[in-house]
Image (tube, rainbow, N blue to C red):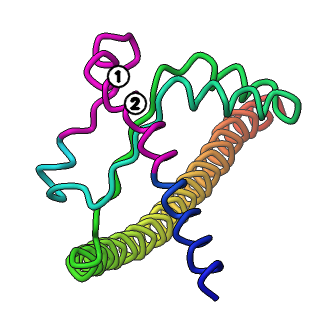
Amino acid sequence: MKSSVMTKWLRSGLALCLGVVLALPALAQEDALKAFPGYVDFGELNSIFGEPTVQISIGASLLGLVASLSAEEDPEAAELFKKLNGVRVNVFETESMADGAIDLVNTARGELGAAQNVMQSALASTLNVRENLSAAESRIRDVDVAMETADLTRNSIMQQAAVSILQQANVQPQIALSLLQG
């Protein structure tokens, strides 16, 4: 029993030492990394979320080890790991912020739903106006066709009356001529 407890303690201590040995160079390199191109600092997250709960720094030596281990399985990823000088990950506790985030999401959903209702109402109104405009245009065209038909009929009647009057006017001189000749 004592040996299994000792073994656990020994393993835990060894893992802790290994973690410290691998983390110390990464922490020492952190300031040096800021000078490299491509360095990105998300420091403003500290002002939003507070101090990180967990910080993980991985140095170039550990990244080189990861690159050599992954070279066979994923050569592209291995090349990427070889080019990295260091990685630092900050983990923030957001459990207390979850309620605020849920409220924010719900508020946004409510505002989007209201905007959607306004858009649907505007669309329905626009479609109604379009239908009414089409009906009014159709009635105007019908009136125009009726007016043109009435004008055509009137002009046709006037033309037929004029032809009839001209025929009668031409017949009367011929009657007078035939009386004189005859």
Overall secondary structure of the magenta stretch?
Answer: helix
Q: Is residue 59 left or right of residue 65?
A: left
Q: Badge 1 is on which residue?
A: 29
Q: 94 or 22: nearer the eye?
A: 22
SS class, disc 1: helix
Query: What label does residue 148 carry, if any?
Result: none
Residue 9 lies, in percent from the top left, at 52, 70
Q: Quadrant of the N terminus?
A: bottom right
**Label 2: few (<14), some (14–19) or many (≥20) C-alpha neighbours in 10 Å:** many
Give the vertical position of 174 relative to 81 (above or below): below
C-beta proximity under 8 Å, tags 1 and 2: yes
C-alpha separation, residue under disc 1 versus residue under disc 2: 5 Å
What residue type is disc 2 on?
Ala
Which range is magenta? 17-43
Q: 6 or 11: nearer the eye?
A: 6
What residue type is disc 1 on?
Gln
Question: Residue sitting at 68 percent across and 43 percent down?
Answer: 163
Q: Quadrant of residue 10?
A: bottom right
**Label 1: few (<14), some (14–19) or many (≥20) C-alpha neighbours in 10 Å:** some
